[in-house]
Amino acid sequence: MRTQLKVATHQRGIGMLAVLFTIGLLAFFMTVLLKLGPVYSEFWTIRSIMVDISEQTATIQGGARGILDAIGKRMEVNDVKAVTTSDFEVNKQDQESFQVVLHYEQRVHLFFNVDAVATFDYQVNIKTQSP
């Protein structure tokens, strides 16, 4: 019983320096999360728009212009601001098939003179109806 009491008197908690380091580290990662979260969320929205357009071939007419119009309308509805329809590259594969490629990067200010650059690439194949 006496040895347990002696050990308990020598135990200490976390030091002030460790607390400050932990708080600083937590603040850093929360800042990165809060700044980069919306950037990735917007990319996932754009990616889901591209996938939805590629799955709905029956409603797309007009070739490359029709594809870009459909993407543009959905981006407007979803309030996408980082990308415009001019950022998309539409390549004709064959008579009724197009490849839509999106490649862009977005710069986000983190703190002081530190910025983060996120680069995004995505592509889908879209079949259209003949006019």
Image (tube, rainbow, N blue to C red):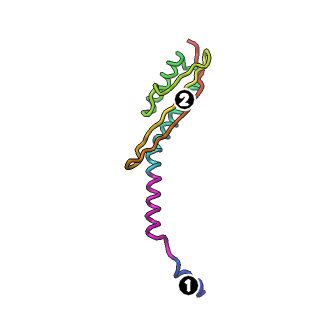
Q: Quadrant of the C terminus?
A: top right
- Where is residue 51 shown, x and y percent of the image? 57, 30
Q: Is residue 25 left or right of residue 123?
A: left
Q: Quadrant of residue 128?
A: top right
- Tell me the number on the disc at residue 6: 1
The secondary structure making up most of the magenta span is helix
Q: Give residue 118's position: percent from left, percent from top.
A: 49, 40
Q: Please tell me which of labels 2 and 1 falls first in the chain.
A: 1
Segment tinted magenta in the rendering: 12-30
Of the 4 image quadrants, the one containing the N terminus is bottom right
The amino acid beneath tag 2 is Met
Q: Which residue is mark 2?
A: 50
Q: Residue at x 45, y 52 (%)?
A: 30
Q: Measured along the vertical axis of the image, is residue 111 above or below residue 66?
A: below
Identify which residue is drawn at 44% across, 34% down. 82
Q: Nearer the viewer, residue 31 or 113?
A: 113
Q: Is residue 71 above or below residue 95?
A: below
Residue at the outermost bottom position: 2
